[in-house]
Structures are given as structure tokens and as C-alpha cells.
Image (cartoon, helix red, strand yellow):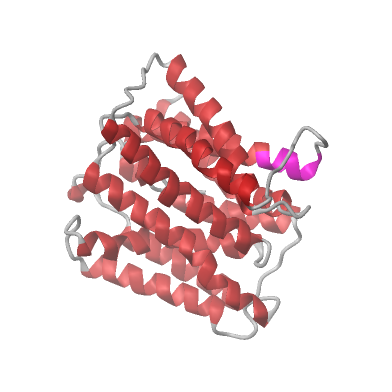
Amino acid sequence: MNRNLTLFLLLGGVGTGWGSTQVLGKWATSTGYQPFGLIFWQFVIATLVLGGVAVARGRSFQITRPAIRFAVVIAIIGTIIPNFTFYWAITRLPAGIMSIVIAAVPMMAFPIALLIGMDRFSYARLAGLCAGLLGVALIALPEASLPSAAMAVALPVALLGPLFYAFESNFVAWHGTAGLGAIQAMALSSAFGVVLTLPLTLGMGQWINPFVSFGLAEWSLVATATIHALAYATYVWIAGAAGAVFAAQTAYIVTGSGIVWAMLLLGERYSGWVWAALGAMMVGVLLVQPRKADGVEAAPDAGETPHQ
């Protein structure tokens, strides 16, 4: 098969898979499962999948103090906090809205990068940030944008996930991955995530025993964790083969496919305000994405992917 066609097909597969996790998250919480129980098992599955990928590639794990510190920080700001807010918000907002909200990650990462001196000011990226803010406003402010006006209260919580993903990407850009490859880094952070979330899950009475019954919610949890792990591994390979700029186009597919999945599988329909918000977000993503001139064509570190 033609190499370019292969890359485009893989890019589409990664974006479509990540986009489906919004609907899967809706199903995973449909039986009343609470965030920490879901996050714990997500960490377990991600550890097994990514650890298996690393072992298959012959990569060893160097457990150093910097590696442990990195893994703990990434587990907290890259998964525990944003996934907690995701599972809380997905029970209160349409899955399609959550797909639009996730597009705010690069727009939030830009001002943080400016503050810590990791990026240069650009009027184009500032315009992208403004377009992203307009997209959020088009969802939150008009009374006709959401099925229920009360849903707007959940929107700030939903935006905390992209904010912490933005913190994560800048943390990785600033501190590096403590000598770990991207797959190793995510596998190790997932392993520490298991340790961190187990006492929270038990202490808050959110334990899930998936072996008692296995229905739609349980399969959705397994699918979410597996898709994320495999999509992440593929994303890293694409970035190494074609560059971070090409791989970053996944963001459009994630948001677009997330809306399509929600319409097909959940029957969601959206007002004109929401479609306008989607357009504003896509313009924002286009403007804030790094260009080749910015010197970002190397393979990404752990925090540079569109998270789900």
C-alpha cells in the first residue's frame, strides 16, 4: 500500500477511535458507575496494553527518581483530574458538546506556554485563542444552544479537562520525559495511576467489580481504555514517521467524528449555535497549531497528543 495512503488511513483511524470515546464514556456512566472506579480500571487496562507494546518493542523501563516523579505528575494532571471532570460532565452534557470542548486543548496550551516562556507570541495564535473562546461562548450563552439551559452549569467543569491536558503538555515540553520514550512514559504513568487511584476508589466507595456482570457499561470501559492506549501508540508512530504537524491534524478528526458518533449512536441533534461553535473551534485549532517553521517536526513527547 502507498505509504502516504497508509499514514492518512492510520490518522483517520486514530482520530475516529478517539472520537468514539465520548459516546463510550456516556455508556460507561449509564449504570451509575462513579469516576474513580472507572479511572482505576482504565489505568489497569492502559498499563497492560502500553506495557505490552513497550515489551514487544524491546524497551526496558528505567525506574529512576525523576521517572517516578514524572509518572506521578502525569498520572495526576494528565489522567486523574481531567478524567474525573470528564466522567462527571459526560453525565450532564451531550457527548457531541464534549467532543467540541476537547478541541480547546491547544488553545489553552498556548497562553500557558507564553507565560512560562515555552512559546513565542503570534497574532495568528491569539486569534485562534479568541476563536476558541467564541466557540465556548456560543455553547454557553444562547438559551437555545443546549437541550437544557441548566446544562450550561456543567460546561466550566467540562473545560477543566482540556485545561489540565494543556498543563500536561507544557509540563512535558518544559521538563521532558525523564529519559523515557513516549510509550514507556505513558505505561509507567498508568502503572502509578493504578496505585494512586486504588485507595481513592475504595475510600470513596466507588469500587467497580466488572466480573460480577458484564454489560454495555463494562464493555464501554474496556473499549475506552483499549482504544486510548492503542490510539496513543499509533499516534506516536505517525508523529515519528510523518512529523508532529501532520499528526496534530488528528484534533479535527477527533472532534468531527465525536459529533458523528454521538448523532449516530445516541441520536443527538444540535442547534445552529452549536454548529457555529464547532466552526469557531475548528478555526481556533487551525490557527493555534504549530507550523513547520516553529521547529516541531520531531516526534512528540507524552503530552503532545490530542487527549481523550
Residue 6, compared with residue 124, is above or below; it is: above
Examine the structure image and report whether residue 147 is included in the region drawn in magenta. Answer: no
Count of numbered marks: 0
Q: Nearer the viewer, residue 93 or 88?
A: 88
Q: Which residue is nearer to you in this view: 297 or 53?
A: 53
Q: Position of residue 115 (x, y in %)?
A: 21, 64
The picture places residue 240, in percent across and down from the top left corner, at 33, 31
Residue 177 visible (yes or no) = yes
Residue 66 lies, in percent from the top left, at: 27, 35
Q: Is residue 88 left or right of residue 171?
A: right
**Residue 254: percent from left, percent from top:** 52, 50
Magenta residues span 215-221
Which residue appears at 61% of the width and 63% of the height? 89
Q: Nearer the viewer, residue 200 or 162?
A: 200
Q: Is residue 263 above or below residue 8?
A: below
- 172 or 278, nearer to the observer: 172
Residue at horizontal 54 percent and vertical 84 percent from the top = 141
Residue at the image point whose x is 76% and y is 60% from the top:
267
Main SS of residues in magenta: helix
Quadrant in which residue 239 is drawn: top left
- Write the residue at 39% across / 34% down: 236
- Relative vertical location of residue 93 with respect to residue 62 in this rendering, above or below: below
For residue 207, above or below residue 279: above
Residue 301 visible in the current orientation: no
Image position of 207 (left or right of 140): right
| In the displayed structure image, the side of residue 131 where residue 30 appears, left or right | right
